[in-house]
Image (spheres, grey):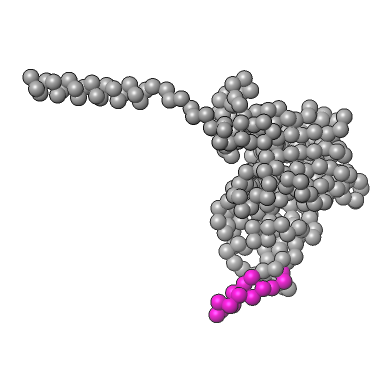
Amino acid sequence: MKDKLKDLILILVVAGLVVATLMPVADKDDSSDNKALYGLNKPLDASVTETQTYSKLSPENNKYIQPGAAEPLKDTVHLFMPLVVGSKWIYRVEGPKKLIKDKTWTMEIETVPSGEEAGKARAGFGNTFNECNIFAEGKTIRLDCLPFTEPLMFNGNRPDTTTGTFLPDYHYAINNAVWKQHFKRKVKYDSPDKKGKIHIQSAVGIQTDRAMVSGNEQTIVPAGIFNSLRIDWTGRIEIKAGKRKLLSQITSEPYRTETTWFTAGIGMIRRRVEYLKPQRSIISFDLVRYSRPN
């Protein structure tokens, strides 16, 4: 009799465990812990860009999206970056605290390129802005405005020259299309001699960013849900002191990968930078607001 009772109790316990695992678990309300900017309740996870997340975060049932983008500009020479004086893009920034100066990064166009003369923009974190350049050759754009393109050891070092392409004519932005943008900057480089003594040298960093179009995606950012062009980047750098190349871990392999998402008539809606060296660091920029003069 005792054995039958033990068996019955064991059966009831197992059944209870099965039922417990099948019951839905209520999500914890963490909105009070993550008050984001511009009324957003919770920051988007850096990986939320794939099509399969669309139904989960659709406008009808989510608390992440607060539309903040002007209507796409249809009549624009540069389809993926409308060059209109007064246009402003505000992004929410997430990443390591030691690298992020503020929770927002803004870029605003002050003048547009004309002939060989570069256009000017002001860009920066929070309320601190610097002037940067936008170059246009036909329907090709290059710029030196974006932060976190250079190796972290040179973080904040503005390039002396910028060549190549940041965005090509949209006719060439087809799947698997490849292009490059180049930066040249003066740097101070620490290198050890054979005895391990560190020497600081004046050098030149020649950076090459290689882009490849990876197709179209439906991308979710605080400003809304957009059809976007995805571009994957790889960053390498060569360092020269005079005519001599300086070889180190940072020059032997790519130091950074990056993905940008562009929406026609609006511009860049998302950017994700991943530094591979000296340690892995991820920084994301998500569009919160896009505006331009009427």
Task: Give the image location of residue 35, x and y in percent.
Answer: 61, 35
Report the side of 20 relative to 118 (left or right).
left
Task: Give the image location of residue 119, x and y in percent.
Answer: 87, 47
Reply above or below: 185 against 16. Answer: below
Q: Residue at x 61, y 46 (%)?
A: 95
Q: Quadrant of residue 278?
A: bottom right
Task: Give the image location of residue 181, x and y in percent.
Answer: 74, 52
Q: Residue furthest bottom?
A: 195
Report the side of 109 relative to 196 (left or right).
right
Q: Residue at x 91, y 46 (%)?
A: 114
Magenta stretch holds residue 196: yes
Q: Quadrant of the C terminus?
A: top right
Looking at the picture, tell me which residue is in the foreground, 194 or 43.
Answer: 43
Task: Give the image location of residue 94, x and y in percent.
Answer: 62, 43
Q: Which region of the structure is painted magenta?
A: 190-203
Q: Residue at x 84, y 42 (%)?
A: 109
Q: Quadrant of residue 110?
A: top right
Residue 239 visible from this viewpoint: yes
- Is the magenta region chiefly helix, strand or loop? strand
Magenta stretch holds residue 106: no
Report the side of 8 relative to 280 (left or right).
left
Residue 229 visible from this viewpoint: no
Looking at the picture, tell me which residue is in the foreground, 97 or 137.
Answer: 97
